């Protein structure tokens, strides 16, 4: 199969091929993948930036909504662990996305949106079970902030490109 693009070597059913095409999964990565050094820097920036954004949003949220002061999910230890785990999973996913798509930024953005919306579900569940709406709103905004910080850190600091950066 020499000379054929990698995407032609993998056989799927027509319906799966349509879904993969819509998702921009073509198994045709760019010629240069993100370097491990840049990925490590992007991961550190993502974790630090996300934790900073979380802390800022909690401070802002408790100032705007004083009734949320002392809310259990606003304790640093409570949100920091979940933030760090989520960011590391996202950062581990970026090199995978760059390997399976010729347009990884577009696919990663779509995945970030879907994952963020899925991560809203536990917050909505705790709201339906009596958590204050204002506190849940802050949690939802925290999810969005983490997604934005992580996405931009990865695609800017550890891009997949046509030229070796490091």
Image (cartoon, rainbow, N blue to C red):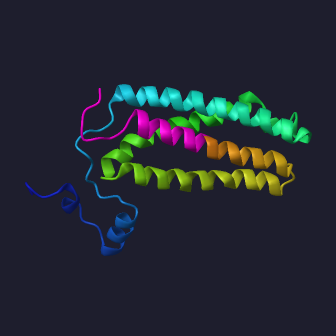
Q: Is residue 74 visible?
A: no
Between 22 and 126, the one nearer to me in the picture: 22
Image position of 38 with respect to 155: above or below:
above
Most extreme residue toward the bottom, as rendered?
A: 14
Q: Is residue 120 left or right of residue 68?
A: left
Count of numbered circles in the view? 0
Q: Is residue 98 left or right of residue 82?
A: left
| Image quarter (top left, top right, bottom left or bottom right) of the C terminus | top left
Most extreme residue toward the right, as rendered?
A: 67
Is 35 colored magenta in this rendering? no
| Image quarter (top left, top right, bottom left or bottom right) of the N terminus | bottom left
Identify which residue is drawn at 53% across, 32% down.
46
Q: Tell me which segment is drawn in magenta.
A: 146-166
Where is residue 59 shown, x and y percent of the image?
78, 32
Identify which residue is drawn at 60% across, 51% down.
116
Identify which residue is drawn at 29% across, 38% down.
33
Where is residue 113 shown, x and y percent of the image?
55, 54
Is 162 colored magenta in this rendering? yes
Identify which residue is drawn at 72% across, 28% down.
77
Q: Is residue 33 left or right of residue 122?
A: left
Between 89 and 113, the one nearer to me in the picture: 113
Q: Quadrant of residue 83?
A: top right
Image position of 2 with respect to 72: above or below:
below
Most extreme residue toward the left, as rendered?
A: 2
Between 149 and 133, the one nearer to me in the picture: 149
Q: Quadrant of residue 121?
A: bottom right
Q: Is residue 55 left or right of residue 112?
A: right
Q: Is residue 36 visible?
A: yes
Where is residue 147 shown, x and y percent of the image?
57, 44
Where is residue 73 shown, x and y percent of the image?
78, 38
């Amino acid at each position: 199969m020499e000379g054929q693009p990698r995407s032609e070597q993998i056989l799927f059913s027509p319906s799966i091929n349509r879904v993969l095409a819509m998702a921009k999964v073509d198994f045709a990565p760019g010629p240069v993948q993100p370097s491990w050094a840049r990925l490590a820097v992007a991961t550190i920036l993502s974790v630090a930036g996300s934790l900073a954004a979380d802390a800022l949003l909690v401070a802002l949220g408790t100032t705007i909504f004083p009734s949320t002061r002392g809310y259990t999910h606003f304790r640093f230890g409570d949100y920091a662990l979940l933030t760090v785990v989520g960011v590391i999973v996202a950062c581990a996913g970026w090199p995978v996305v760059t390997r399976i798509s010729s347009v990884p930024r577009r696919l990663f953005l779509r995945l970030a949106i879907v994952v963020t919306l899925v991560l809203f579900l536990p917050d909505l569940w705790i709201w339906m079970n009596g958590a204050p709406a204002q506190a849940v709103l802050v949690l939802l905004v925290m999810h969005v902030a983490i997604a934005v910080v992580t996405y931009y850190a990865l695609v800017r600091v550890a891009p997949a490109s046509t030229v070796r950066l490091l």
